[in-house]
Image (tube, helix red, strand yellow):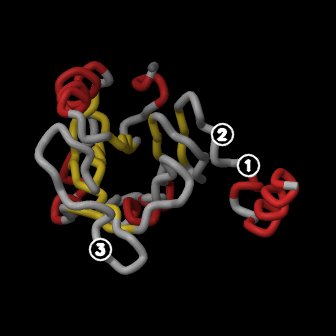
Amino acid sequence: MPIPQLMHKNSVVVLWCTNASQHHKAIQEEFLPKWNLQLVHKLKWFKINTVGELISTPKPDGFKQPYEMIYIACSKENDILNFNGITKVDFLISIPSIIHSHKPPLTDWLKTFLPNNTNFKGLEIFARYLQPQFTSIGLEVLKLMDIRLYNMKQKSEEISKEGS
């Protein structure tokens, strides 16, 4: 991916990552250096159910976890001190979408840590939907942009027709 060509000094790169240790290693040791990025922070996104409990119990390494890792990076030209306060956040908690792999938007949260948040520009890798002020890259960038996914009345009517 031509990440360096898509960025400028003040860009923010957010990467969601499963819990495979080889993926974590690749991000930190291969991708970030190759893309001329520095790691600002990494944190966990804990997935809870509607009663506020983890969707599953934490397991030993190598097994599916009730959380995913979020990597936040910026250009090596950017002063990492510009992200003051973000490292005090160790995790985010939310109820995951019923739609597979639909991540919660982080834009408003990220903006609180940026000195120039009015001109915020983000880059999301392996994105599955578009967000304002982001360049989104991935094989499924438009996957979750179909309005039919969010119009539950229309969706239930379509399901009813399919069952007839």
Between the residue at mark 2 and the residue at mark 3, the CA separation in whole angstroms equals 31 Å
Q: Nearer the viewer, residue 93 or 159?
A: 159
Q: Give the residue pinned by disc 1.
A: 146
The residue lying at 30 percent from left, 49 percent from top is 68
Between the residue at mark 2 and the residue at mark 1, the CA separation in whole angstroms equals 8 Å
Labelled disc at residue 105: none
Quadrant placement of the N terminus: top left
Q: Give the residue pinned by disc 2.
A: 142
- Which amino acid type is shown beneath numbered disc 1? Asp
Number of dots carrying numbers: 3
- Which amino acid type is shown beneath numbered disc 2? Leu
Check disc 2 and report its element: helix, strand or loop. Answer: loop
The residue lying at 23 percent from left, 23 percent from top is 33
Q: Residue furthest left?
A: 60
- Which amino acid type is shown beneath numbered disc 3? Glu
Q: Within 10 angstroms of label 3, few (less than 14), some, or many (20 or more) residues?
A: few
Between the residue at mark 3 and the residue at mark 1, the CA separation in whole angstroms equals 30 Å
Q: Earlier in the sequence, mark 3 or mark 1?
A: 3
Single out the mark in the foreground, 2 or 3: 3
Check disc 3 and report its element: helix, strand or loop. Answer: loop
Q: Are marks 2 and 1 in contact (CB under 8 Å)?
A: yes
Q: Give the residue pinned by disc 3.
A: 53
Single out the mark in the foreground, 3 or 1: 3
Query: Could you tell me if residue 10 is visible in this image?
Result: no
